[in-house]
Amino acid sequence: MTLPGHPFLASHDDQLTLEGHSLSELGRRFGTPLYVYSRNAMRAQAASYQRALAGRSHLVCYAMKANSSLAVLQTFAEAGCGFDIVSGGELKRVLAAGGRADRIVFSGVGKTAEEMRLALDARVRCFNVESEAELSMLSEVAHAMGRRAPVSLRVNPDVDAGTHPYISTGLKANKFGIAHEQALAAYARARALPGIDVVGIDCHIGSQITSASPYLDALDRLLDLVDALSAQGIDLQHIDLGGGLGITYTDEEPPSAEELVRQMLGRIDARGHGHREVLVEPGRSLVGNAGVLLSSVLYLKPGEEKNFCIVDAAMNDLVRPAMYQAWMRIEPCQRRGSTVARTWDVVGPVCESGDWLGHDRKLAVEQGDVLAVLSAGAYGMTMASNYNTRPRAAEVMVDGDAVHLIRERESVEQLIAGERLIG
């Protein structure tokens, strides 16, 4: 029996499995905390976007900030995807994983001159520019190199995506993009700069969006600008629709990638822009439900007001619950019919009261059991830290019958190797 929203995750013979592999056995084999990913789940999600865009010029750019492990990037590169990056380090990761620079769009509000030079040398496909100050710097850097930087301006449409304030990016109060009212002037300035080639327009309004309406509202505002720019003789090659499509953590019912893209393409065609190339930048929707975080139960600590299930994964391994108050489903990897279920707060060993993975979860667990935190493929390992001098988790990728260790567990010796005593 598969779990809702997780087509490659199943409960079979009282064992939780991913692509048929027992998660409790993987946890014991590789140790915990452990991230485990389904490669076929990632491929299936990428294919859903590609099917929706078939028959027209397009590029699916994986927003790699969601999960930047090399084997994950390799999976999407082999599936024909491009990449949405936000740093020079992410550029180097893509290239190390076999990705092509001419399929990279470089986003982010704070690109340095060094990062611009690195990207220009690599010949990335496009820079998504987010301010006029950045536009000036990019022109200066490109002109000094004897180059012209291909540019798409990221426009902030002031559309509420209806998501957590920390992951909302399309409102006037957010730091991202150029205000809609200033966009025409910014494009006119970009066209006049010596180191800039204007090639597109970009919009991204947030993350974990579960309705098509905000996308369509933002798209209408974007197409208004495309019409106005055409009237001024600025004819754009591509329209970048951004990403942010949500996944099911609890009872959310986001549109499928195919349904969302179908609606957006219909709007583009109806407005007379079907000839333009379309770019999309999905992240969470490609990897979120492809991964789980495995953690072993260290101790059970019943109390008068709360019962605590203390596990070996912590906020340094998965910060989403502490940072975003995110609800993530937690399941035992092996079901025990003889154990009575109780209500537990699942907490980690880090010395913070905010170190929790789940509140008030009814679980039948015993000391030594392995638990799986579901929907952990996005913004899990990529946001992990070494707080409390805790080495980061290992990562495993399952692919049919194969099991691959794609990142070794860190050691404390590695953490302190770059530090120096005084004298």
Image (cartoon, grey):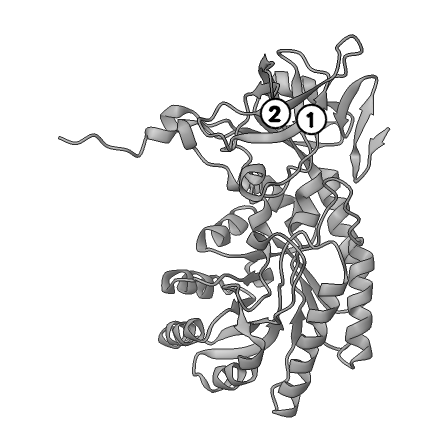
Query: Could you say which quadrant of the image residue 375 lies in?
Result: top right
How packed mark 1 is, by other alpha carbons closer than 10 Å (few <14, some 14-19, many 20 or more), is some
Query: Could you say which quadrant of the image residue 405 lies in?
Result: top right
Q: Which residue has dot 1 on it?
A: 361
Total numbered labels placed on residues in the image: 2
Vertical arrangement, residue 233 with respect to residue 136, above or below = below
Q: Which residue has dot 2 on it?
A: 346
Q: Earlier in the sequence, mark 1 or mark 2?
A: 2
On-image quarter of the C terminus: top left
How far from the left and from the top, in percent, is residue 133? 41, 74
How far from the left and from the top, in percent, is residue 81? 67, 55
How far from the left and from the top, in percent, is residue 136? 41, 76
Q: Three-letter amino acid code at disc 2?
A: Val
Q: Residue at x 48, y 61 (%)?
A: 122
Vertical arrangement, residue 353 with respect to residue 231, above or below = above
Q: Nearer the viewer, residue 148 or 168?
A: 168
Q: Residue at x 56, y 35 (%)?
A: 318
Q: Residue at x 68, y 17 (%)?
A: 25
Query: Could you say which quadrant of the image residue 294 lies in?
Result: top right
* 331 sits left or right of 326 in the view: right
